[in-house]
């Protein structure tokens, strides 16, 4: 069927799309008149996945910002660590190679010192901040933090009375 439509130059959307995909992924067209072979669908899917993976890798090679990302990510699959928190945002910046470290600042401001100000032991690079720095300590878990402290700090910086004083006057 496909061969008939293609040879008769009936350029339907289906014929055009099939031709494009056949050329892009290097998959032979299947004849609709013959019975499908065992495992044919699986072979086609694997060939398409391999072609997409190769195209993904070559596109990552052309982008210098993805140098850290492409060395550690080997397959096209979703990452489940990003939850829109500050920590996951910093990890995403680190994977993209754009985490604001002193070595990145020194690229644009040559007089900037690249030594880590937390530990003073090494150059402050992404690798040092994420894996090696001993000066970074994790904060307390959110369950242990007092939610009123943040609110009080915001009110005091705005010169407002604490929540207790305002509620007793009304």
Image: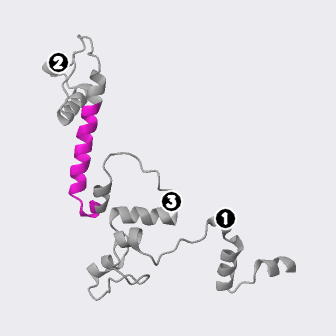
Considering every residue shown, the one lying at the far bottom of the view is 111
**What crowding class fits label 3: few (fewer than 14 Cα within 10 Å), some (14-19), or many (20 or more)?**
few
Q: Element at badge 1? A: helix
Residue named by callout 3: 84
Residue assigned mark 2: 3
Q: Which residue does the image show at 44% across and 76% down from the upper left?
A: 134
Quadrant including the N terminus: top left
Q: Earlier in the sequence, mark 1 or mark 3?
A: 3
Residue 34 picture location, percent across and down: 23, 11
Name above or below for residue 165 compared with residue 92: below
The magenta stretch spans residue 63: yes
Q: Quadrant of the C terminus?
A: bottom right
Q: Earlier in the sequence, mark 2 or mark 3?
A: 2
Q: Residues within 10 Å of mark 1 (few under 14, many from 20)?
A: few
Quadrant in the rendering for residue 17: top left
- Please state the horizontal and vertical placement of residue 65, each as a whole percent of the image: 28, 64
| Res 28 → quadrant | top left
- For the residues labelled 2 and 3, the Cα–Cα distance comes to 50 Å
Cα gap from disc 2 to disc 1, whole angstroms: 66 Å
Disc with the residue nearer the chain's start (2 vs 1)? 2
At which x and y percent is residue 54? 22, 44
Q: Residues within 10 Å of mark 2 (few under 14, many from 20)?
A: few
Task: Tell me what residue is drawn at x 60 percent, y 70 percent.
Answer: 140
Tell me the magenta residue range: 46-67
Residue at the image position 41 percent from the left and 84 percent from the top: 117
Position of 165 with respect to 148 (left or right) is right
At horizontal 28% and vertical 37% (from top left) the residue drawn is: 49
């Amino acid at each position: 069927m496909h061969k008939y439509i293609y040879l008769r130059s009936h350029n339907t959307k289906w014929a055009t799309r099939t031709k494009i995909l056949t050329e892009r992924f290097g998959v032979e067209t299947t004849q609709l008149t013959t019975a499908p072979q065992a495992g044919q669908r699986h072979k086609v899917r694997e060939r398409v996945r391999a072609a997409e993976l190769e195209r993904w890798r070559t596109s990552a090679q052309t982008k210098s910002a993805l140098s850290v990302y492409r060395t550690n990510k080997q397959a096209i699959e979703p990452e489940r660590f990003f939850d829109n928190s500050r920590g996951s945002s910093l990890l995403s910046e680190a994977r993209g190679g754009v985490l604001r470290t002193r070595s990145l600042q020194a690229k644009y401001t040559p007089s900037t010192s690249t030594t880590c100000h937390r530990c003073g032991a090494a150059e402050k690079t992404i690798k040092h901040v994420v894996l090696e720095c001993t000066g970074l300590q994790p904060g307390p878990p959110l369950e242990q933090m007092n939610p009123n402290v943040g609110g009080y700090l915001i009110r005091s910086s705005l010169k407002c009375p604490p929540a207790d004083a305002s509620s007793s006057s009304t």
